[in-house]
Amino acid sequence: MRVALISDIHGNEVALRAVLEEIESDGIEQIACLGDVATLGPRPGRVLDLIESLDCPCIMGNHDEFLLDEQLLHEYSDIPLVVDAVKWCSQQIEDRHRDFLRSFKSTHEIDLGDGSSLLLFHGSPESHMQDLLSTTPDDELDRHLAGRHATVLAGGHTHIQMLRQHKGMLLVNPGSVGMPFKEFVRGRAPTILPYAEYAVVDAEGGRVRIDLRRVNLNKAVLQDAVRGWDMAIGQDLYRQYA
């Protein structure tokens, strides 16, 4: 079984289509989405439609829930660039998109066969706002895993690709499809990299392999996607794509 992991798309239709094209060309039929689908990007509705058409497991990210509960957004961030962009995206989507978002799960487990399993979440199994990093101490990581075990544990949220072995389990972050960060920012302004990230879990005969992938994107096409988007975050993305 091969499962493509996509996460943190953030309304970037250009990046999502590039990743889906590579997944299809590689013959990978199973996809799992780890959340943060629509906000902070110029095409939230189109991206939600694309994800829904995949008919794949979808995990609730913090930004997905912001579109359902505005109060949660204000508890998470008071940065005007972020708050304004989320509110704008909320105004662009339809009730059917919110119905789709409500179907997202906090966690989901996939049987990889031969006794192997893949556990999906966004930040951690206990919270979609939790950061799990390569530098997270073992005892802290144990607390955030909340007693959950699987051959492969997969989450996003940090926008940083990662593969880490923890007590025999593989912890993977596929990175961000739509907004990959140069480094972990913890609330600081990020540097956005001009490619799309995802990962592939390949399981066969009890053996598991993780492949972290990057897809190069055309900067001019990325700029065109945000050109004329009258939001502070759009102007920032335009500069970063230059």
Image (cartoon, helix red, strand yellow):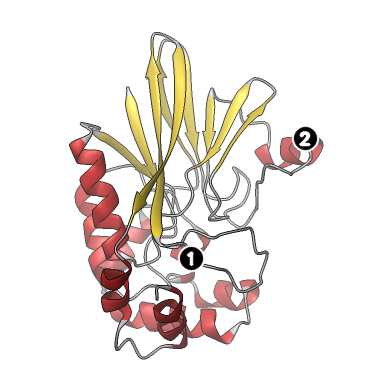
The residue wearing badge 1 is: 63
Residue 23's place in the image compared with 3, above or below, is below
- In the drawing, what numbered circle is on residue 127? none
Quarter assignment of residue 171:
top right
Q: Residues within 10 Å of mark 1 (few under 14, many from 20)?
A: many
- Depth check: 125 or 8 in front? 8
Q: Secondary structure at mark 2?
A: helix
Which residue is found at the position 61% from the left and 82% from the top?
A: 79
Q: Amino acid at mark 2?
A: Asp
Q: Amino acid at mark 1?
A: His
Decide if residue 55 is in sight here: no
- Depth check: 19 or 48 in front? 19
The N terminus lies in which quarter of the figure? top left
Query: What is the CA distance from the residue labelled 2 to the residue labelled 1?
Result: 27 Å
Residue 74 vs residue 17: left or right? right
Quarter assignment of residue 57:
top left
Residue 235 vs residue 125: left or right? left
Which residue is found at the position 49% from the left and 42% from the top?
A: 107
Q: How many marks?
A: 2
Q: Position of residue 185 (x, y in %)?
A: 65, 64
Residue 234's place in the image compared with 53, above or below, is below
Q: Residues within 10 Å of mark 2 (few under 14, many from 20)?
A: few
Which residue is found at the position 30% from the left and 84% from the top?
A: 227
User: Quick check: marks 2 and 1 in contact, CB under 8 Å?
Assistant: no
Q: Secondary structure at mark 1?
A: helix
Q: Earlier in the sequence, mark 2 or mark 1?
A: 1
The residue wearing badge 2 is: 138
Residue 188 vs residue 155: left or right? right
Q: Position of residue 74 (x, y in %)?
A: 60, 78
Decide if residue 75 is in sight here: yes
